Amino acid sequence: MKISIINGPNLNLTGKREPEIYGTQSLESYFTVLAAAYPDVEFTFFQSNIEGEIVDEIQRAGFDADGIVINAGAYSHYSLAIADALRAVPAPAVEVHLSNVYNREPERHHSAIAPACVGMIAGFGPDSYRLAVEALDSMHNS
Ligand code: DQA
């Protein structure tokens, strides 16, 4: 099974950025452990701060991978372009967030991309990604 993990703006700073919200572990180090825990899954990891590059990666990975795990960062809340890209490809996508966006500011309560995803996981720190991988894995095997 192939899973593409796509991260949006500022997620490259996870571990250093607002650690009281996003924790102190870098996503790079978390993904090393995640990949080791799923030896049968072929992962690709992508991060960009640029909306169009995220759209390009969804278009690329979405015809190749069996599933997409996407944390579009702030774009999650307003990017119709990312939502359209997710709808344009066959791979099912799970929206993830490190923080529980629903106990934060009201502008983070809306997701533009959730309607284009099979589900959403938020609030478990980096473990949100593992839970999304679990969900895609069991969907794939059922
Ligand atoms: C985030 C939540 C977003 O509201 C925020 O803009 C981010 C990170 C999260 O993972 O909790 O950049 O997607």
Image (tube, rainbow, N blue to C red):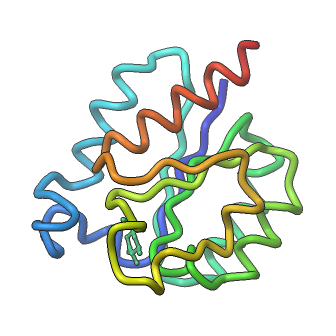
Left or right: residue 136 compared with residue 71: right
Q: Is residue 4 above or below residue 2?
A: below
Residue located 24% across and 64% down the image: 14
Quadrant of the snapshot with the N terminus: top right
Q: Is residue 55 above or below residue 35?
A: below
Residue located 57% across and 50% down the image: 120
How far from the left and from the top, in percent, is residue 23?
15, 58
How far from the left and from the top, in percent, is residue 19?
12, 67
Q: Is residue 17 above or below residue 99?
A: below
The number of numbered discs placed on residues in the rendered structure image is 0
Quadrant of the snapshot with the C terminus: top right
Left or right: residue 114 compared with residue 34: right
How far from the left and from the top, in percent, is residue 75?
55, 80
2 or 92, which lies in front?
A: 92
Residue located 50% across and 74% down the image: 109
Q: Quadrant of ligand 1?
A: bottom left
Residue located 30% across and 36% down the image: 32
Q: Is residue 138 above or below residue 3?
A: above
How far from the left and from the top, in percent, is residue 38?
44, 20
